[in-house]
Amino acid sequence: MEPWPFEDDQFTVNVDVSCLSQLKFDSNEALVEALKEAAIRTQEWTFIKQ
């Protein structure tokens, strides 16, 4: 990324994500139920100034 807009030369961002195997749901309620039952894992990205 040019110009590098961050103070640090490297930083890591992470978020919790719900892992769903189904891509489409018949209703919002079905999606909500799937999210309640889904495994949660942490996704992490490290940004490094090149």
Image (tube, rainbow, N blue to C red):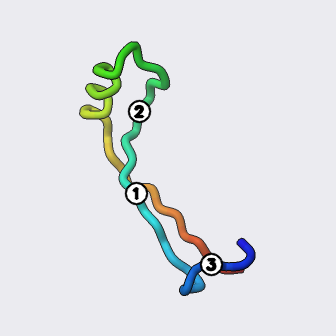
Disc 3: CA contacts within 10 A as few (<14), some (14-19) or many (>=20): few
Question: Which residue is rendered at x = 37% and y = 41% of the image?
Answer: 18
Residue at 71%, 71% in the rendered image: 1
Which dot, 1 or 2, sits closer to the camera? Answer: 1
Q: Where does the C terminus fall, quadrant-wise?
A: bottom right
Residue position for label 1: 15
Residue bearing the label numbered 2: 20
Q: Secondary structure at mark 2?
A: loop
Q: How would you rate the neighbour count of disc 2 (Cα within 10 Å): few for under 14, some for 14-19, many for 20 or more?
A: some
What amino acid is found at the position of numbered circle 1 in the picture?
Val
Q: Is residue 15 above or below residue 49?
A: above
Question: Residue at the spot x=72%, y=78% of the render?
Answer: 3
- Quadrant for residue 32, please give it: top left
Residue of label 3: 5
Secondary-structure class at tag 1:
strand
Cα distance between the residues tagged 3 and 1: 21 Å
Q: Position of residue 38 (x, y in %)?
A: 31, 35
The mark lying in front, picked from 3 and 2, is 3
Q: Is residue 13 left or right of residue 2?
A: left
Inter-mark Cα distance, 1 to 2: 16 Å
Query: Residue type at mark 2?
Result: Leu
State how far apart marks 3 and 2 are (Cα).
34 Å
